[in-house]
Image (tube, rainbow, N blue to C red):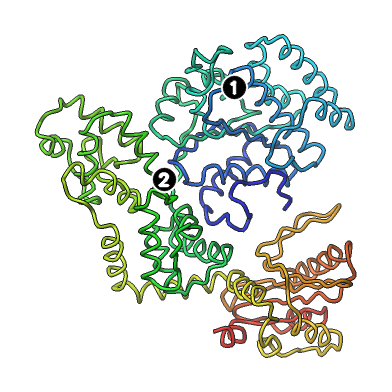
Amino acid sequence: MIYAFKERIGSPLLFCGRKKPMALLMNWVDMIPREMAKSRALLGRRKCGKSAMMQRLFNILWNQHGKVIPFYFEVLDYNQWLLDFAADYYLTFMSQYLSFKTRTVLPTGNQPWEFFELIEMAKQIGDNHALKSLNFFQEHLEKEHVHNVMMLAFGAPANFAGLENVSILVMIDEIQYMTKYVFYDKNQEKVAYNLPGAYHGLVESKIAPMLVSGSYVGWMTQMMQDMFKGGRLKRTPIASKLTFEEGLEAVYRYAVYNNKEVSDEVALVINRLTQSDPFYIASLFRSDWEEQDFTTVEGVVKTLTYEIKDREGELFGTWSEYIYATIKEVNDQYAKKIILFLSKERHKECTRDQIAVHLGGKLSAGALEEKLRTLKYGDLITQGINNFRYSGIPDDILDLIFRELYQEEIENDKPDIANDLANKVKDLEQYQKSLVGKLRELKGRMLELIVYRELNQCRNQRQPLKNLKQRLRPLLKVSPQLEEILAACSVSTFETTWMNYPLQLPSTTNVEIDVLATGKDEEHCWALMFETKNREPNNLPTKVEAELFVTKVSMVKQWLGASQKVRFVCPLYLSAEGFDNSVEMWLHEHGVLTTDMAHWEPVNE
């Protein structure tokens, strides 16, 4: 896949899990060309993956090059004049629109092109609609016709969708910032608090539906109630946590990416302590603490303790800011007391009456309900089975940071974060057997990751893949050429390794290589490529799948040969439960080596 839009997550490899919400969004996108998709709002607190999902969706649609053109715009939290904001919005849209039409990757940092560059691109493809729009917009911009500029910018996606008979997906990240950081006047004195209301009609467009997001759930919810009445935006909650299996995969991926060696035991502990949260996992591995240690469970606990307690820790900095913003909305000590009270037994629901008693009856029913609603919107407490019941922060780390900030102030009792984390590890020990079983099951489904981790380790050590020949199934069709490739691969080192590598050649469809490793010297280049399948014995790889892999091999050879002479491409098909004889024979005849877990794992362990 071509990443026309540079995703903030960094390496595409780091996009982990999110299978269910991404499937939901892809099914929703499929409805857009049929004009059946209702605009949506992704709701979830900061760092829960909303931006990553929207940016990945942009790249998927850009690569599909179908009838849905993606447009992504992020509202930033700094003061802006509406004229400048609208100009940036319009230039961003036109840049991404012409990027899609011309198949041109966006500039570094996803910055929009200048007017003269966009005009030249439109001329090259003869896009008269774009040329007319660009010239018309510039005229109003130069005359500082603020209202006209705003309406032209906000309406551009729907207008182009209608003119070009296509669909355009309008993605606005952190839309709630429009109500605080954009100003109607040049002197930035009059806040455009109702600016999202300009989308009141546009949000109902079926040819240019909207996908918006907000990280401050209460703020976002209130804005939707005020400016998108009548359920114009369908709410789509985004959880910050991955599934246990997805979280464990994230641990292994981030460990490899950050060049950290972790044992399976340590990986399990990290996944549990972070509750499978990819932001926590990433923050832990990139911690700046001088004594960070991931070789032991104790080292993980100490590193995580630093991130939670220390003012320089990324986790402390992120969530203390988030907590301050929500507490500020309530603006008194009672909010802190409510959160701490509910945190004591976080998974037990308390009634509003019980909370009122804890506060000494000093708040009226209405005032208490308003505070509880604000805290719930801020994701600092959880709604119970009805509007009368509440429970504590569902997030272990957020709870620890809150207690680190306020417990001593409220109860004159300083929390022991390190001890709390150590106790969580002790609790894990009783589940160790079931977790190890789950790990084995998961690793069986993660063949790409198993292979990738080993290849990456070999790359770091500048060593060839160990005992390669002994880890293969016997050849059913002896081929001198295949033996030669195997011999060369067994002594070759690799400089780069990828998992799920997207490959596209001119006039071909995208294909994905499960695992790819490449190396080169002054004269030649070479590659080792894997196809992996983990299925039941009654569902082994088919002849069609074998043919598809051989096609991928040819594409890799063509891709490598475009820049340097190819010494060899060694293709290896790893099917956990083996192969049908006829399919394996065909693979060997076409120069593909084969293996299964019974042959591969013993040496690997």
Residue located farthest toward the front when viewing the structure as drawn: 290
Q: Residue at x 51, y 35 (%)?
A: 213
Q: Quadrant of the C terminus?
A: bottom right
- Residue 180 vertical position relative to residue 292 in the rendered view, above or below: above
Q: Residue at x 76, y 67 (%)?
A: 548
- Residue 576 vertical position relative to residue 476 in the rendered view, above or below: above
Assess disc 1: are there few (<14), some (14-19) or many (≥20) residues with their C-alpha within 10 Å of its C-alpha.
Answer: some
Tell me the tag on residue 317.
Answer: 2
Q: Looking at the picture, how far across and down is residue 412, in whole percent?
A: 16, 46
- Residue 482 vertical position relative to residue 269 in the rendered view, above or below: below
559 displayed left or right of 23: right
Between disc 1 and disc 2, whose residue precedes?
Answer: 1
414 displayed left or right of 445: left
Specify the quadrant of the image occupied by residue 371. top left
SS at mark 2 in the image: helix
Along the line of sight, which residue is nearer the eye, 502 or 320? 320
Q: Looking at the picture, how far across and down is residue 286, in whole percent?
A: 51, 58
The amino acid at mark 2 is Gly
SS at mark 1 in the image: helix
Q: Looking at the picture, how far across and down is residue 566, in whole percent?
A: 87, 72
Along the line of sight, which residue is nearer the eye, 201 or 454? 454
Please tell me whether mark 1 or mark 2 is closer to you in this view: 2
Q: CA distance from mark 1 to mark 2?
A: 37 Å
Tell me the tag on residue 202.
Answer: 1
The amino acid at mark 1 is Leu
Specify the quadrant of the image occupied by residue 141. top right
